[in-house]
Image: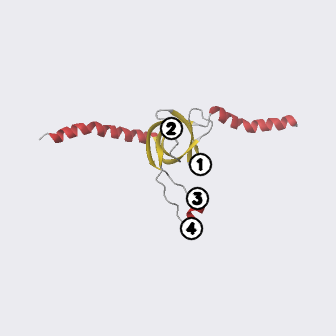
Amino acid sequence: MNRIWCLAVFLCLLPTAQAQSLGVYQHGTVVRMRMGDCLAHHGFVSMMGGQPAQPEAETCPEYTLVSDKVVFVIVGKSSDQIVPLADVIDFRLRGHELAVRIDDARHESKFHIKEMVLRSQWDLVQKHIEDELRAMPSALAARAQP
């Protein structure tokens, strides 16, 4: 009976062990960073309080993270959440946030997801921008001629 119980527990834990060995993280590359306004998420209690909180002029990092299928624009929760550019990082979706691990760190940094777009659509937009930039010098030269 004890062997059957141990076998049942082992079989229940097997999918979890396989998921951990395969890795639940996806991989992506940070291609852009800029500083922007922090996304403030206030709870119900703070919204119903007597005096409204004074808005702080804090800026937070905003990153563009490119994965195989999806491109994310993520915003840090504070100004000290720095992610190196051009590095491949491990990330996973966690609720309404993106949890990021950098260089096998022991803890995850959590970022708000600001935007998501399919990689194929993002590639088309980037190609269109490049084409417009290439066409711009010839259009400026044509305008300069009398």
Q: According to the image, label 1 marks what residue?
A: 95
- Amino acid identity at mark 1: Gly
Identify which amino acid the numbered label 3 is placed on. Gly
Mark 4: which amino acid? Answer: Gly
The residue at 26%/38% (across/down) is: 135
- Front residue of this view, candidates 95 and 48: 48
The residue that disc 4 covers is 50
Q: Secondary structure at mark 1?
A: loop
Residue 43, which numbered label?
A: 3
Tell me the CA gap for discs 4 and 1.
Answer: 30 Å
The tag earlier along the polypeptide, 3 or 1, is: 3
- Image quarter in which the C terminus is found: top left
Separation of disc 3 and disc 1 at Cα? 16 Å
Q: Residues within 10 Å of mark 3 (few under 14, many from 20)?
A: few
Amino acid type, callout 2: Val
The first of marks 4 and 1 along the sequence is 4
Find numbered disc 3 in the image and state the secondary structure of the residue it sits on: loop
Residue at the far bottom: name it. Answer: 50
Q: How is the image coloured?
A: secondary structure
Q: Nearer the viewer, mark 1 or mark 2?
A: 2
SS state under label 2? loop
Q: Residue 144: percent from the left, percent from the top?
A: 16, 40
Q: Is residue 12 left or right of residue 26?
A: right
Mark 4–mark 2 distance (CA, rounded to whole Å): 38 Å
Return the disc, 1 or 2, that comes first in the chain's sequence. 2
Q: Residues within 10 Å of mark 4 (few under 14, many from 20)?
A: few
